[in-house]
Image: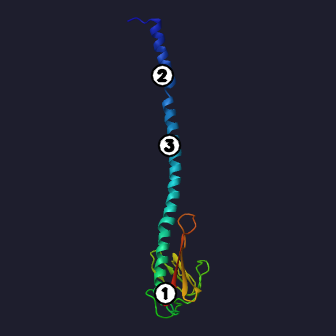
Amino acid sequence: MTNTPNTVARVTRRMKSAASDAGSMLVETMVAMCILLIAMAGLLAMDGIATNFTENYGHLASRTAEYAQDKMEQLLVLAYGDVDGDTRVFPSALAGGTGLAEGGSSDPAAPVEKYVDYLDVNGNLLASVGTTAPTGWYFKRVWAVARPSANLKQITVTVTVAIAFGRLKPPQSTMVALKSFPF
């Protein structure tokens, strides 16, 4: 086989082409990895936000609603004229509280004595004195009783969480019910 000038020229061109493409595979791989890392960083940030919202407005918000309903049921069981039953303990005591006497506050920032109780992280009732929060409280329940008409009482219960997951506002649930005389 003889080397003709055309054959040598073709081989030389192929070698030059191969040499110029030698580093392009590495560059393409690095660019693809950078794009992949940027996409993954965006997805991880969204995962953190989703976790915060799920914990606060899924889990904690549903628990505040559950504990508001528990307190509301405890208050609605009282007789319309009960002004001495203590619902800060469970089961309710016959004396030492306010029963369904008008008063209280549905604002968690301004609790009224005998119209507030505290729960731990598992929903267990904690002993407290006045409006001072006991150590280890996680949920605060406040309630108010108003009398919009002669034979009607409006009961409002608000439950909030001590701290929220992430830097979001702690979830809060409010429940309102009417109780009529003579029930």
Three-letter residue code for mark 2 = Ala
Q: Secondary structure at mark 3?
A: helix
What residue does disc 1 label? 87
Specify the quadrant that holds the N terminus: top left
Residue underneath mark 2: 18
Residue where numbered disc 3 is placed: 36
Badge 1 vs badge 2, beta-carbon distance below 8 Å:
no
- Seen at 53% across and 88% down, the residue is 100
Q: Which residue, as the protein is rendered here, is positioned at the far right? A: 110
Q: Look at discs 1 and 2 and give the one toward the viewer.
A: 1
What residue type is disc 3 on? Leu
**Horizontal side of residue 142 vs 10, given as left or right:** right
Residue 78: give x, y in percent of width and height.
47, 88
Q: Residue 172 falls in which quadrant of the image?
A: bottom right
Q: Where does residue 30 sit, x and y in percent of width and height? A: 51, 37
Where does residue 9 sit, x and y in percent of width and height?
48, 11
Q: Quadrant of residue 112?
A: bottom right
As measured in the structure, the alpha-carbon distance from the residue carrying label 1 to the one carrying label 2 is 85 Å
| Secondary structure state at the residue bearing disc 2 | helix
Between marks 2 and 3, how big is the CA–CA gap?
A: 28 Å
